[in-house]
Amino acid sequence: MLNVMVLAYQGRAPEDVNARGVADLRRELFDTYICEVLARNRQTARQYDAKTAVRRLWCLAWWTRRRAGDRTAVPRWMMPDGWYGLSLPGVDYLTHAVCLPALFAALTAGVTLVMLAQYGVLAGLAVAGAALLLVHLLPHPWQKHEGNGPDRVPLFALILFAGTAITVAVTVAALGLVELLTAKPALVVEGAVIAGSYVVELIVFHDNRRRLLLGVRLAVVVAASWITLSLGDPTAFACGVAIGLLIAHAIRMLKSLPTDHLPTTADKGWRMDPWVAGGAVAAFLVALVLGADFASPQLEAVAGIVVGTVAAKAWRRRPPVLAGPLSRLLHDSLLRWSGYLPWHRRAFLQYAADRHVLARTGRAQYSFIHLLVRDHLAECTPDELAAKVDRRIGERAARTQAGSFRA
């Protein structure tokens, strides 16, 4: 610490130092300490640039202070829960302007592609229309964020392809389960799910107008189901109902993702409709390239999709069960993607321990060397401190180069 004080105050008059407040002196002192220890060249398995290192230290310090109070220990596992209040502009931008459009497009593309291949063009259009309608309806929890980033295109592509693959797998599994159960048991299960949701709605809400609307919707669903089953293929109808329920529930879950941990205000100027339409168009193009038979429509599947979508509207006021954990998992992943958390936790903690920001307290156990260091990192502006670290690295490099020239 004496060496750090020499670095912080060298070349300055004592009167100038004494004239400043204690908080300013402490901030300057610990800024100098962080800059000095991160600027030193030490042999570790992995190296990190100043911006990445400071961002990760800041995030660990912020999270540790919020969760552990006056303890300095870094938890062994960084769980995605408990990040409430940590709203970063870069992460907000990636959530609302990159991840949500990719997820909506992937969901629509995956379901539309499977239904096109299985039941023809009308079923694909019905799925795309249902998705577009559900996304367009309120609430709109997403915001319009201005920004740019070099990693947004790879992130969008990764989520789009992974989301489409997962959606295709889930949709095929749902259709296979319905066909495995055969039509009557599958319709009994779907009817029980729909009836259960309506009963809960009738119990929870005491508004007579809402109860009347639920009763009318239930009557429409029952009548449409009876007419379709009496005239057409019950298996195709049961598959359509399952897909209608699936896409309605999935879209409501995606709508819940950005509102779980981020303080959002709905911005009606930011639309997801073009991304949903784009996903549907992409599915039609892929199906055309793969040689799907567009000339064999099954109207029973189309009717089932409509019935399932209409029946699922009773769930719109209750948040999906998995929305909270998925939202926090998305936030945690974006913190890592943006460089605020390490992907390989042990390697980064060892890096920070080698530079005397953390101390190893046991096997795979670390803590900040002091509460003051942790609190200083939690209260700093990461990018500004990283710029100071870069300047210190430049100063040390220039001094080393000057010494080699003199030699």
Image (tube, grey):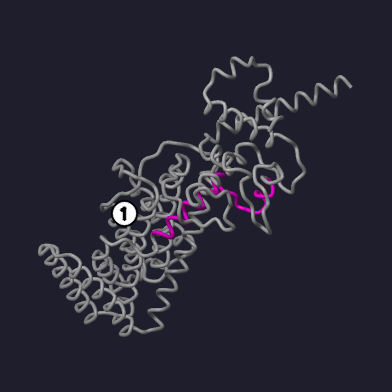
Magenta part mainly helix, strand or loop?
Answer: helix
329 in relation to 54, above or below: below
- Tell me if 311 is positioned left or right of 117 in this view: left
Residue depicted at 38% across the width and 60% down the height: 323
- Tell me if 128 is positioned left or right of 36 in this view: left
Q: Specify the farthest residue to the right.
A: 407
Q: Which residues are magenta?
A: 324-351
Q: Can residue 162 be seen at all in this image of the molecule?
A: yes
Q: Quadrant of residue 303?
A: bottom left
Which of the pair 267/163 is nearer the observer? 267
Residue 202 locus on image (x, y percent): 18, 69
Residue 168 locus on image (x, y percent): 46, 66
Q: How many marks?
A: 1
Which of the pair 81/260 is nearer the observer? 81
Residue indicated by mark 1: 135
315 in relation to 191, above or below: above
Which of the pair 6/224 is nearer the observer? 6
Secondary structure type for disc 1: helix
Q: Quadrant of residue 364?
A: bottom right
Residue 238 locus on image (x, y percent): 31, 77
Residue 57 locus on image (x, y percent): 59, 43
Residue depicted at 70% across the width and 27% down the height: 394
Q: Quadrant of residue 194?
A: bottom left
Q: Is residue 349 magenta?
A: yes
Kind of residue at disc 1: Val
Query: Which class describes the residues within 10 Å of circle 1: few (<14), some (14-19), or many (20+)?
Result: many
Q: Is residue 400 magenta?
A: no
